[in-house]
Amino acid sequence: MIEHWSRMDFLRPGLADIVDILAVAALVYLLFTLVSGTRALQMLMGFVVLVVAAYLAQLLRLEALNEIFEAGQLVWVIGILIVFQPELRSALARIGRTPVLKFFVRVEESPVVGEVVRAAAQLSEEKRGAIMAIQREVGLMEYVESGKRLQAEVSSELLTTIFAPYTPLHDGAVIIEGNNIVAAACILPLTQFPVYDAQIGTRHRAAIGLSEETDAVVVVVSEETGQISLAVGGRLEKNLSPEQLTERLQTLTQARAHT
């Protein structure tokens, strides 16, 4: 009996096994958190189906299918890097913002937050539609090229002027990089996910779409209701007060400098 039990020793996990399991679980959770609510989730599920199919082909000794999957392994790796490029960059940026690394960096409040919030509050009060995208780690050059270059320092006065009705630049998005408005009247990608909320218009769909494809933070003011919304990570936070918007933007747009 003792000899039989000793053969089952591999079923008793050690400390290293527990750490390994927790690390894998955390990695899987982080992966699904990054792609949840985005188009990448559908692609990830498709990849999981392919992995399961490859495993079953190997288990059932389906030689022809095994050859196909083995031949496509390199293509899979390249495809993953291309398809999940925004999510991978977002994950690396998130790792860089972990609390442990705060000992090595100094956090400064972004100077654009106050100007953007003041502009959003005024536009909201006057019920003027607006969409303002703030670049973070992922560049927005392809969307900048779709609009009109400005390279002007961010100010609430300039932002409210841009979104004045019937002006040449009011129809489209403003893109902010650092302390500057780099372009206005920019065309943003619309979300590909179905939106069932009747209050979600084209501006909101564009804000969600950009936040799905990049790590940009997008502030939207509704022309119909005057409500202020914030799109980040493919999600839309609706009906924010200026105080709530300030808090969220300060958290999301922290400028870092090495100490």
Image: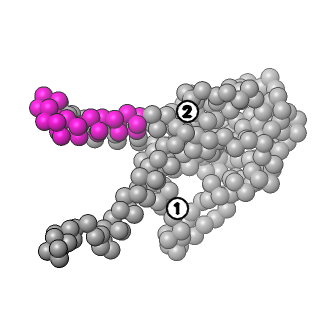
Q: Which mark is residue 97?
A: 1
Residue 52 among magenta residues? yes
Task: Give the distance between the C-alpha atoms of the residues marked 2 and 1, in whole angstroms.
Answer: 26 Å
Image spot of residue 57 (x, y percent)? 19, 35
Q: Which mark is residue 16?
A: none
The residue type indicated by label 1 comes to Arg
Badge 2, how many Cα within 10 Å: few under 14, some, many 20+? some
Q: Residue at x 67, y 36 (%)?
A: 174
The majority secondary structure of the magenta stretch comes to: helix
Farthest residue, direction right = 126
Image spot of residue 186 (x, y percent)? 62, 30
Q: Nearer the viewer, residue 6 or 111?
A: 6
Q: Is residue 250 left or right of residue 163?
A: left
Image spot of residue 152 (x, y percent)? 67, 43
Picture quarter with the N terminus: bottom left
Disc 2 marks which residue? 143
Q: Nearer the viewer, residue 80 or 16?
A: 16
Q: Is residue 61 visible?
A: yes
**In this view, 143 is above or below 122:** above
Q: How many dots with numbers? A: 2
**In this view, 199 is above or below 51:** above
Q: Residue at x 13, y 28 (%)?
A: 64
Q: Residue at x 46, y 53 (%)?
A: 30
Foreground tag (2 vs 1): 1
Element type where label 2 sits in the image: helix
The segment highlighted magenta reads 43-66
Q: Is residue 178 left or right of residue 171?
A: left
